[in-house]
Amino acid sequence: MNKKLRTSAAISLALCLSACDNAQVAPKIIDADGKSYLACTGLVWVDKTSGTFSSETVFKVSFTDSGNMSHTIWGIRKLSCRR
């Protein structure tokens, strides 16, 4: 791959990731409202929004588990992601 193409690919990737609230590389342990989940492969995507009927912050998390199944959890009020 030539240098210009690599540079363009790196810039494109950076722009795509900057549009998201937070992308982290698995593996991660996700603690969401008192329940634990294990993200084993790929990326863990965390989006922060306000609630539908209030200004309270809520989260949406997307990840892939050990069985290669994709999951999206909506409406999380208390969230932490750790190794």
Image (cartoon, rainbow, N blue to C red):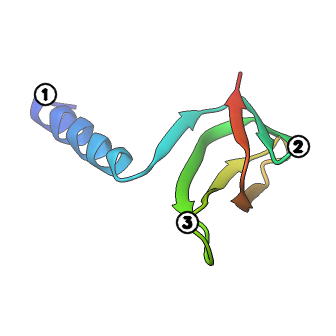
* 52 displayed left or right of 71: left
C-alpha gap between disc 2 and disc 1: 47 Å
Q: Front-most of 36 and 43?
A: 36
Q: Front-most of 28 and 80?
A: 80
Single out the residue that lies furthest toward the left.
4
Provide residue 30's location: percent of width, then percent of height: 76, 38
> What residue did someone put label 1 on?
3
Single out the residue that lies furthest toward the top.
83
For the N terminus, the quadrant is: top left
Provide residue 36's location: percent of width, then percent of height: 87, 39
Q: Are marks 3 and 1 in contact (CB under 8 Å)?
A: no
* 17 displayed left or right of 34: left
Describe the element under mark 3 as helix, strand or loop: loop
> What residue did someone put label 2 on?
34
Q: Are marks 2 and 1 in contact (CB under 8 Å)?
A: no
Amino acid bearing label 3: Ser
For the C terminus, the quadrant is: top right
Single out the residue that lies furthest toward the bottom.
53
Instruction: Specify which label sits upstream in the sequence, 2 or 3.
Output: 2
Describe the element under mark 1 as helix, strand or loop: helix
Provide residue 61's location: percent of width, then percent of height: 66, 52
Q: Which dot marks residue 55?
A: 3
* 31 displayed left or right of 13: right
